[in-house]
Image: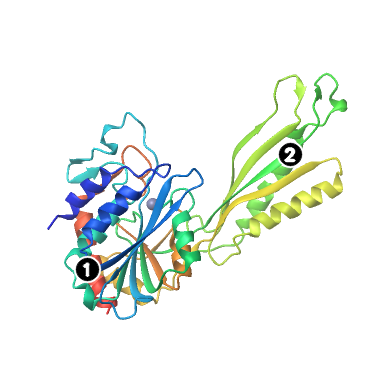
Amino acid sequence: MASVTEILLDLIGIPSVSSASNQGVMEYARRRLQPSQWDVRIFPYADPNGIGKANLIALPKKGSNPEVVELALVCHTDTVPYPDDWSEAVHPKVIDERVYGRGACDVKGFLACILAAVADLDVAERSVAVVLTADEEIGCIGAKRLLSEKQLRARYAVVGEPTQLHPVVAGKGYALGEVLVRGKAAHSAFPEAGRSAILDAATLIGSIRKIGLRAAMERHERFEPPFTTVNIGTISGGTAKNIVPAECRFLVEWRPVPGQNERWIADLISEELARAQKDDPGLQATFEPIRIDPGFETDLQSKLVEELKRLSGNAAVAVAFGTEAPYVKKLGAETVVFGPGDMKTAHSVEENVPIEELERCVQVLRRLAYSLAK
Ligand SMILES: [Zn+2]
């Protein structure tokens, strides 16, 4: 039987950057799931660029109630891109008992753990599902599709992400919107003939800064920092130093804490724009939300949390990065994010995973299947 490290080396060797197809990884997973034991369903779709993508759900062939499983093991199959000159990206290397390559920890490491853990499980006895998704890195698109298609319900779910084998029981959401300010171009020697979109944007940015300060008052002590953060990450506007700028746009990003309406900041920004336009009818600005993903939170008393704490020997924590957990939670499952490796190395050319954590993760998943997936 292949070791978890061998499986991971295979998986890293099958590139699956979100801009390309993930079907190679799905085919590999299908081959690893014994056809005598597993009923593997692949759900193909074409992304907006016409690229073939797929989700996958594998259920035990002789499972009792395939529509509601006790334990779902969930993992995305896409990765972020990598620079051309990083030779290990898809030709992984083992250095000092760590596997280096794109996806090593985010999140082919966990996928390898799933495939290794279920390989010698008597699945006919276990109410367990393997759920693999596409396009997580570009907005959890695969998970959202699975949710809308209602293909599965689960009581407990483990969503793979690098957490150094800490059970993650809460995560902030992720939201993004664009403010577009329109002014009127004029020669800068005669500014009164125009209206500066950049100066209007500056006024609005001052107000959004205050919204950020207000958000910081609503504390959620599980997180560090313990509140919804607001960031204006990019701004562009103007065409020349001597022209009054006719247009300015900027991106506002916020990471909502769970329990708070994830649209709250969007509502505050829209209200602020309306107020500013009422005070100054010449001001023209619109706000367009681009993406609003909620956070998630799981009860510390959940049996899944208790089991993962016991089996990993690690405390439950909260994280600030976004995951598929909020969507998986909507499948009805008590959800924990868990996996080998450290997110601090993910998305970089240092991405790696310690082999010792891979092996421990396989043991944890196996024991979890025995204790929860009855
Ligand atoms: Zn990930």
Q: Earlier in the sequence, mark 1 or mark 2?
A: 2
Q: Amino acid at mark 2?
A: Val
Residue 347, labelled with which disc? none
* Disc 1 C-beta below 8 A from ligand 1: no
Label number found at residue 366: 1
Tell me what residue is drawn at x 22 percent, y 71 percent.
367
Q: Nearer the viewer, residue 326 or 226?
A: 326
Q: Nearer the viewer, residue 83 or 196?
A: 83
The reply to whether residue 320 is visible in this rendering is no
Q: Secondary structure at mark 1?
A: helix
Q: Quote the CA–CA distance across marks 1 and 2.
A: 55 Å
Give the left or right position of residue 241, taking residue 253 as reference.
right
Closer-to-camera residue (96/157) = 157
Which amino acid type corresponds to the residue marked 1 in the rendered image?
Answer: Arg
Residue for point 75% across, 28% down: 245
Residue at image point 25% right, 77% down? 62
Provide the secondary structure element on which disc 2 rests.
strand
Image quarter of the C terminus: bottom left
**Residue 232 falls left or right of residue 279:** left
Give the residue pinned by disc 2.
Answer: 181
Q: If the image is split into quadrants, where does the N terminus sit?
A: bottom left
Identify which residue is drawn at 45% across, 68% down.
329
Q: Is residue 156 above or below residue 214?
A: below
* Label 1 crowd (10 A; few <14 / some 14-19 / many >=20): some
